[in-house]
Image (cartoon, rainbow, N blue to C red):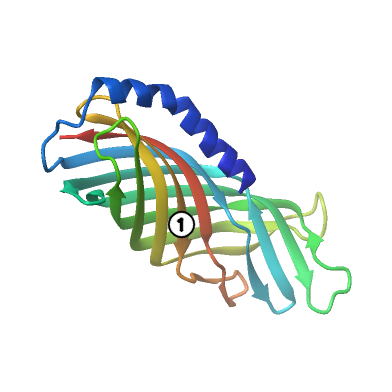
């Protein structure tokens, strides 16, 4: 969380000169309804550690920070007392590789054991419907908040490790896909660069609704998916 906060602050400071130029050069003279827009965002995500219980103990995975890409299309409505509302559809892709894996045997007094040579990655496709409120639409610094709900497809791909120690053949424990309901919240700002083009910087929190997977041994397990991301993008208003 500390690293993510530092990244967000650095990005906002880097964007401040652009925001100042936009504020001076492009006043909000765009009329009532902004109309349709298309936006592309890229960023980095932090996937929280996740675990599932096996008959012999608990298997826990910690992941590397990974890539995120979001493509959204929406409509910005006329201004109201708190700014303006946007409604958009969003297609998302997230990918995080395995960093560390641990196994905590049932009844063990020594705690969890770090597994050697872990491998695998988590890939997520999502389709979300977002509702966003801009507090200063069309300005050089337009803060906003938003929420979203939709559908996700999570692939816990080829999770395994050399359970017998370094240099031994790897054992794949989980390689399965599940889909279901997903939720997200976001906070960020837009900076109007031209009358049609805006810079977008935001932080978002993404959570899947209790995905269920089948291990390579045929056991059904639940493993949570929760992630946060720092995003930077460009929005084009038609």
Residue, x 74% and y 61% (percent of image)?
A: 102
Quadrant assignment, res 65: top right
Q: Position of residue 148 (x, y in %)?
A: 34, 58
Front residue of 120/188: it is 188
Extreme residue toward the right, this view: 109
Name the residue located 48 percent from the left edge and 69 percent from the top edge: 211
Q: Residue at x 66, y 59 (%)?
A: 61
Total numbered circles:
1
Q: Position of residue 15 (x, y in %)?
A: 43, 27
Tell whether 168 sits left or right of 194.
Answer: right
Name the residue that disc number 1 marks. Answer: 206
- Seen as rendered, the residue at the extreme front is 81
Q: Looking at the image, which is closer to me, 114 or 74?
A: 74
Q: Quarter holding the C terminus? A: top left
Indicate whether 29 appears above or below 82: above
Q: Is residue 233 above or below residue 111?
A: above
Question: Mark 1: which secondary structure?
Answer: strand
In the rendered image, residue 106, in percent from the top left (x then y), is placed at 79, 78
Q: Which image quarter: residue 209?
A: bottom left
Q: Is residue 26 left or right of residue 106?
A: left
x, y percentage for residue 39?
29, 39
Q: Nearer the viewer, residue 132 or 153?
A: 132
- Left or right, residue 215 beside residue 187: right
**Residue drawn at (49%, 32%) of the image:** 11
Give above or below for 6 relative to 175: above
């Amino acid at each position: 969380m500390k690293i993510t906060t530092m990244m967000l602050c650095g990005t906002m400071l880097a964007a401040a000169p652009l925001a100042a130029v936009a504020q001076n050069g492009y006043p909000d003279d765009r009329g009532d309804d902004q109309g349709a827009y298309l936006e592309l965002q890229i960023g980095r995500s932090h996937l929280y550690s996740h675990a599932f219980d096996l008959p012999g103990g608990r298997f826990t995975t910690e992941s590397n920070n990974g890539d995120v890409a979001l493509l959204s299309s929406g409509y910005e409505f006329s201004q109201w007392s708190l700014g303006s509302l946007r409604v958009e559809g969003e297609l998302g892709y997230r990918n995080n590789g395995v960093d560390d894996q641990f196994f905590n045997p049932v009844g063990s007094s020594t705690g969890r054991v770090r597994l050697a040579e872990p491998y695998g990655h988590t890939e997520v496709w999502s389709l979300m419907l977002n509702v966003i409120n801009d507090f200063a639409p069309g300005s050089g610094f337009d803060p906003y908040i938003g929420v979203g709900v939709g559908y996700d497809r999570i692939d816990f791909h080829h999770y395994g490790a050399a359970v017998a120690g370094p240099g031994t053949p790897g054992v794949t424990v989980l390689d399965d896909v599940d889909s279901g309901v997903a939720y997200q919240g976001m906070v960020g700002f837009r900076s109007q660069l031209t009358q049609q083009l805006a810079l977008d910087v935001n932080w978002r929190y993404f959570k899947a609704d209790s995905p269920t997977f089948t291990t390579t041994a045929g056991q059904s397990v639940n493993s949570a998916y929760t992630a946060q991301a720092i995003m930077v993008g460009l929005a084009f208003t038609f």
